[in-house]
Image (cartoon, rainbow, N blue to C red):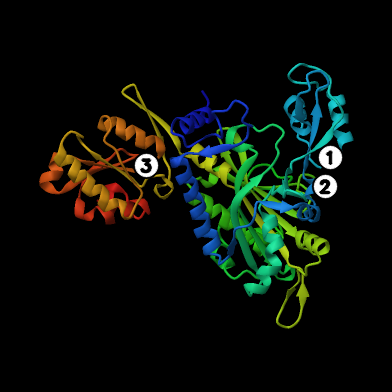
Amino acid sequence: MSKYEDVVNLALRRSLFFPASEIYQNAPKGMFDYGPYGASIKRKVVDLWRKELVQKENFLEIDGAQIMPVDVFKASGHLKNFNDPVVQCLKCSSVFRADQLINEIAGKELPEAMANEEYDAEIEKNNIRCKKCKGGLDKTTRFSLMVKALVGFKSKTDCYLRPESCQSIFVDFARMNKTMRIKLPVGISQYGRVFRNEISPRQTLMRSVEFSQMETEIFFDPDKIDEIENFDEIKDYEISVLRQGKHGIELISAQKLVDEKIVSGKLVAYYLARVQQLYEKYGIPVEAMRFREVSKDDRAFYSRETWDFEVKTSIGWLELIANNYRTDYDLKGHMENSGQDMHYVYPDGKKLIPHVYEISIGVDRTFYAILDHAYQEETKKDEKRVLLSLPPFLAPMSAAVFPLLSNKPELMKKAKDVYNLLNSCYEVFFDTSGSIGKRYARMDEIGCPFCITVDFDSLDNNDVTIRERDSTEQKRIPIKDLQNILFMLITGMKKLKDF
């Protein structure tokens, strides 16, 4: 069994995530529910993004509607450009993405921006047929990824579920400009659901129809792209990049990226650094990260410069973030189509339509990448131990409290007292079922970093045994010190061995 299968099986076994509406056989693929532990981890992933990017960078955060009128997507270019090239089998009617089918069978990576006729030529040249029945393929067509919604009863309004959350930010920019007294550069962020009508959803969270994004659009004056207030904080920080035309990943300082014009300016280098630092805190090692420079042919239709942030997982390099320099494409499009003025006006009267740098993070893919790197198996004395070695602050439970025996009222009372003490500050789980070893194993599998056992010595000495997940080390800790010690352990200030 592959590691990917191990991770997915663990997720299903502990209900971290699972197919939505799974009790119905006709439920569409590509949609997933998160159970209590998974939802907790996901929430903490978002909380850290909010703390490290939104709050520290003094961004504004909005919460936009998921259903938007068709005019929004005419202006953004999505109705025209947001589609995939597809081919259909003339024999069995199976449908495939043309570029992926060619890559899978002929080993050729082709840009999505190619014309339909170019895909047809590649299919003919490489004698590519249906991979299911070996039948011939029809001509390449385009399949819209937009999910349509009709709103209203009598006069139905054509609407779409948003395919990316950023359009809410762009259409709200004029209001934010007026009411929030913004000063360039300014970031506007949003966390929420988006929807894409994927042809063939697959690999669970990696390609789904409904998923979550953490999005930031940074509005700035292109003439001041090198005027970044906190750039000196990260100028010597090395960023893992894979450049076009270069072989292998390079560690290049933010300052060097700017000096050698590898990126458009300090603003781009600064936020590449901040993103990499964020993922280090998620528990991803730098050697498993890279910013891959995307070629002109492969970039989104609105982007002048793109660095895809990818993490190496058990299923290969997985794209988690699109870092796009969108120029003034979106604001201009909405201004022309809505008639709303999108100019920013300086105190001296200078007017401009701001340029936009985007950090578009896939939350569900990030969730999977964190699990993939946290998943570990150990075998001792012919017994396999499975654990999620999550950073303690990401774990769904900060600690678990166990009475040694559930049939001893005095132990149950003492354990409940410890639970109530900690539960006022932390997310704590109380478990009385099964042996201590089985209780440890359950907590290891969901990534709970610390287990606290109340035994008969606890009654006499007013202390408990605390066990660390990764090392399995155990120590006696006075109950009066437990809150403070747990805080230091969860925040990483100290390890259990330090006490």
Dot 3 lies on which element? loop
Residue 3 position within the rendered picture, expressed as x and y whole percent measured from the top left = 51, 29
Residue 458 position within the rendered picture, expressed as x and y whole percent measured from the top left = 15, 44
Is residue 253 shown to the viewer in this render?
A: no
Residue 339 sits above or below residue 155 on the image: below
Residue 79 position within the rendered picture, expressed as x and y whole percent measured from the top left = 80, 47
- Looking at marks 1 and 2 on the same chain, the residue that comes earlier in the sequence is marked by 2
Residue 60 sits above or below residue 289 on the image: below
Q: Residue at x 28, y 56 (%)?
A: 484
Q: Residue at x 77, y 72 (%)?
A: 352
Q: Nearer the viewer, residue 5 or 182?
A: 182
Task: State the mark number for residue 77.
Answer: none
Residue 447 in which image quadrant? top left
Q: Nearer the viewer, residue 35 or 200?
A: 35
Residue 457 sits above or below residue 426 on the image: above
436 on left or right of 275: left
Residue on which the image places disc 3: 448
Q: Residue furthest bottom?
A: 348
Residue on which the image places disc 1: 114
- Looking at marks 2 and 3 on the same chain, the residue that comes earlier in the sequence is marked by 2
Q: Measure how far apart labels 1 and 2 are at the Cα level.
A: 15 Å
Q: Nearer the viewer, residue 273 or 15?
A: 15
Task: State the mark number for residue 80.
Answer: 2
| Amino acid identity at mark 1 | Met
Is residue 241 shown to the viewer in this render?
A: yes
| Amino acid identity at mark 2 | Lys
User: Can you tell which of label 1 and label 3 is closer to the viewer?
Assistant: 3
CB atoms of marks 1 and 2 within 8 Å: no
| Amino acid identity at mark 3 | Cys
Q: Residue furthest left?
A: 460
Dot 1 lies on which element? loop
Residue 161 sits above or below residue 432 on the image: below
